[in-house]
Every structure is written in C-alpha cells, then in structure tokens.
Image: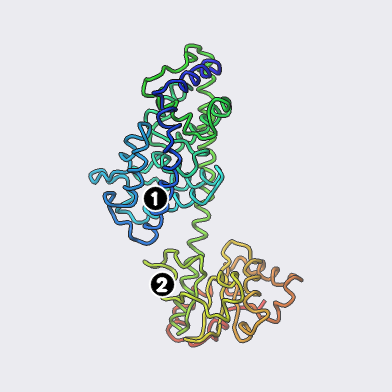
C-alpha cells in the first residue's frame, strides 16, 4: 500500500481540482481558523451566561457552524448535524440545559488544552453522557481549534478511509472516529514529507477518494494485506474502547466524590445562613449545581479585603462563615471527602497564620467518619507544629448530618458546631 499510496498522493497534489489545491492551499484557509475559533469561544460564553437560547436558528452556534460549512466542498453540509430536528429531539443540546453545558465544556476544554490526551479525555467525557444526536460531527469544530491533532469528519472522509485502509469505521460513533484518527495519524507520519502536520491535508485526500474522484490503491486485492490492515484498525478500535471504559469508570467515581463534596458544602452553606452568618463559597465551586440553583447562591461575591489579602489559597477554602456585615471570620471549613487532607490544612494555615484573621475564628476539617485516623495523623505531622495553637477541629459527616436541622432551628453562633466536632 505504501508505494501505491505514495503515487496517489503525488497525483492528488498535482491535480488543480483536488481538495488539496482548492481548499488546503486556499489562501483564505488560515484566516478562517482564527474567526471560527473566536466563534467557538462565543458559543461557550453564551452557554455559560445563559443567553444561548434553546434553538439552533439565530444562535452563535449557527453562525460558527455556518462559517465551517462555507469552507469549500470538504465541509459542505457540516451544519446538517447541528440543525435542530424537533421530531427526533436531536441533537439534544438546545432544550436540555445540562447537555448544552456539557457541550460547552467540551469546546472549552479543547480550546484550553494543547495535547491530544486532553482532547481525547474531553471527547470521552461527552461520549459517556450519550447525548442523543451529538456525535463525531463535532470534530469539524475541534479541527479548527487543533488542526494538527484533530481530523475533520464526514461521510465521504469515512468512506475514503475505509476504502484506503480496509477498515470498517461507522458514522455517528466517537470510538470509531477516534480509531480512524489513530489510523490517519499513522498514515500521515508514514507520508509526512508528502503531506502536512495539519491533518486536514490527509482528510482531504480521503474525502476525494470517498467521493469517487480517485480510486483507492489496489492493495485490497491482496487478501493478506487486507487482513493485516483490518486487524490493525480493529486493534485501534479495541484500544480506544478499553481506554474509554477505564476513563468512564474513573469519572463515575470522581463524580460521586464531587457530588458528596458539593452536598456537604451546601449543607454548611445553608447552616451558616440559617445561623445569621455571611457565607463564602470557594471561588472555584460557586457555579456548581446544588438544590435547584448554584452553590454560590445567597453567598458573598467577594471576601473582605483583610481576608482576601491572605492569598489565592484562602479563596479556595470550601466554606467560610463571617460575622454578618463584618470582616471577621467566625469559622472556616475544609471538606475532605477523598482528596488530600494535607492541602486542606495548608489552606487553613494560610488563612490563620501571620494575621489576626484566625485569632478568634474556629477552623474545621470536615471529613467522612472513616477518615478520622487519617485526619489525626496529618494534624500530628511535624510540618504542622503550629496547628495545635490554632485548634483545628474535626467535624465528621455523621454529626453534621444528624444535628444540622436542630442547630439551624435552635442554635446560635459557633457553639453548637463546637459541640459536635472533635479536637484531635
């Protein structure tokens, strides 16, 4: 296949009507990358701001996908996958807010990352959600963010790839797309001097083969070569599926942990508000979903200056209770469901040491009952010799769960929380 494909690539590049010459070498092509990437960023901002709407028509997504579809023949029809089909309820990113946000996270993650591992992880995350009608056509957007890492995707490209390699890639499935990408990268490396590190060039060749402009190399007449090629593709597909399965299991564990962590933060938030305190939620957690709203609802938008100047680590403390309308910290809580207890103690020290912020405040490590001994061991470390002066206390989940309603109804100040926590 190597020799015959080499000949095909040379013939393709010399054809003035090939995708290589009409699109890949098109002088406007690189300019389109910049504008399309900006458009993708606007889609993310609109979704995050809640202004995206619940329809494709008139949205920022229609604008950016329309720009992609205008990028010559290879992307013609790119908008079909994103058009809202109400009878089928696909793609389900317009009327389903959670799916819409997941879509934004995919685009944003790929825009912020610069490695194929991060891109594949983001793709696996969206694939795990099984959003109806949202499949590898999204790769046409991701390509304009990372052209050297992501290949364009459409029916003709798949048809051409299958014809050239003997694979059996199917439309509409992310695992099949990722296996095709593996194969394209391998071919691209083998013919690097003829092609480009931009995967659009090789995708353009597959597109032209898939459309029948060129015949695939006659390698498939050789049964042994065909068997080898098919086995290679199946190995790629199995690898992708195994990695995806392992990643999804880990995400389920992480999601369960995150949900529990957020739930405890929410309970501490509600309890603090019920007791009359102003409440601060960690700056990186305020947007988390909780109780039909966001975790930061009803809480301070900014920390008092004398507290915030203690550094960025303080802003990441899970929950802080402050005296109403004052700059005095009454209590601070670090929730350690499964993460390192060490990091929580460090943030507590940043809050308390070197100022009078923590002089009259109480610091709590909130953790599952099963982590009591681990908390005790960390507090006893020589590196935390000053901890004993600060009086950091351990608040078990079970005590918070059992007494929080009574404390919210009948309690006052910090004393009830002191009563249900422990000094280790």
| Dot 2 alpha-carbon crowd within 10 angstroms: few under 14, some 14 to 19, many 20 or more | some
Q: What residue is at 56 percent from the left and 45 percent from the top?
A: 115
Check disc 2 and report its element: helix, strand or loop.
Answer: loop
Q: Position of residue 134 (x, y in %)?
A: 37, 43
| Residue projecting furthest to the front | 27
Give the residue at mark 1. 39
Which corner quadrant of the image does residue 295 belong to?
bottom left
Q: Earlier in the sequence, mark 1 or mark 2?
A: 1
Question: Could you say which is closer to the camera, residue 147 or residue 391?
Answer: 147
Residues under labels 1 and 2: Cα distance? 30 Å
* Residue positioned most to the left: 87
Q: Which mark is residue 24?
A: none
Question: As displayed, is residue 340 above or below residue 29?
Answer: below
SS at mark 1 in the image? helix
Q: Residue at x 28, y 54 (%)?
A: 54
User: Between 257 and 104, which is closer to the camera in this rendering?
Assistant: 104
Percent coordinates x, y for residue 237 in the rendering: 50, 32
Instruction: Give percent across and percent down for residue 6.
Output: 53, 19
Placement of 260 over or under 224, stated as above or below: below
**Which of the image's four quarters has the C terminus?**
bottom right
> Residue 104's spot in the image, x, y percent?
41, 53
Crowd band around label 1 with a 10 angstrom C-alpha radius: few (<14), some (14–19), many (20+): many
Compared with residue 238, is residue 132 higher up or lower down, i.e. above or below? Answer: below
Query: Which residue in the structure is indicated by mark 2?
Result: 297
């Amino acid at each position: 296949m190597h020799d015959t494909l080499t000949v095909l690539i040379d013939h393709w590049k010399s054809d003035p009507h090939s995708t290589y010459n009409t699109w890949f070498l098109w002088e406007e092509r690189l300019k389109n990358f910049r504008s399309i990437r900006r458009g993708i960023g606007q889609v993310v901002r609109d979704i995050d701001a809640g202004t995206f709407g619940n329809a494709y028509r008139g949205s920022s997504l229609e604008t950016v996908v329309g720009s992609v579809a205008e990028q010559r023949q290879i992307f013609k029809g790119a908008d079909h996958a994103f058009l809202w089909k109400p009878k089928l309820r696909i793609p389900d990113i317009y009327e389903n807010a959670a799916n819409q946000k997941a879509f934004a996270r995919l685009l944003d993650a790929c825009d912020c990352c610069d490695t194929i591992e991060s891109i594949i992880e983001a793709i696996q995350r969206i694939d795990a959600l099984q959003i109806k009608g949202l499949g590898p056509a999204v790769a046409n957007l991701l390509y304009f963010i990372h052209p050297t890492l992501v290949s364009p995707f459409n029916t003709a490209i798949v048809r051409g790839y299958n014809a050239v390699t003997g694979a059996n890639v199917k439309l509409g499935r992310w695992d099949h797309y990722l296996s095709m990408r593996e194969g394209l990268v391998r071919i691209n490396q083998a013919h690097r001097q003829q092609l480009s590190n931009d995967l659009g060039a090789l995708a353009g060749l597959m597109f032209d083969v898939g459309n029948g402009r060129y015949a695939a190399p006659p390698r498939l007449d050789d049964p042994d070569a065909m068997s080898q090629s098919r086995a290679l593709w199946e190995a790629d597909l199995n690898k992708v599926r195994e990695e995806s399965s392992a990643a999804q299991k880990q995400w389920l564990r992480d999601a369960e942990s995150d949900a529990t962590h957020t739930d405890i933060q929410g309970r501490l938030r509600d309890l603090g508000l019920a007791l009359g305190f102003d409440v601060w939620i960690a700056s990186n957690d305020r947007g988390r979903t909780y109780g039909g709203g966001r975790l930061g609802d009803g809480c301070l938008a900014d920390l008092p200056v004398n507290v915030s100047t203690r550094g960025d680590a303080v802003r990441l403390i899970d929950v802080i209770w402050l005296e109403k309308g004052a700059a005095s910290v009454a209590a601070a809580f670090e929730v350690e469901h499964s993460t390192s207890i060490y990091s929580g103690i460090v943030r507590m020290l940043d809050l308390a040491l070197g100022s009078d912020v923590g002089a009259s405040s109480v610091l709590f490590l909130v953790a599952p009952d099963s982590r009591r001994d681990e908390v005790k061991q960390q507090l006893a470390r020589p590196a935390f010799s000053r901890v004993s002066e600060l009086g950091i206390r351990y608040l078990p989940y079970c005590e918070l769960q059992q007494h929080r309603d009574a404390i919210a109804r009948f309690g006052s100040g910090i004393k009830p929380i002191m009563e249900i926590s422990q000094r280790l």
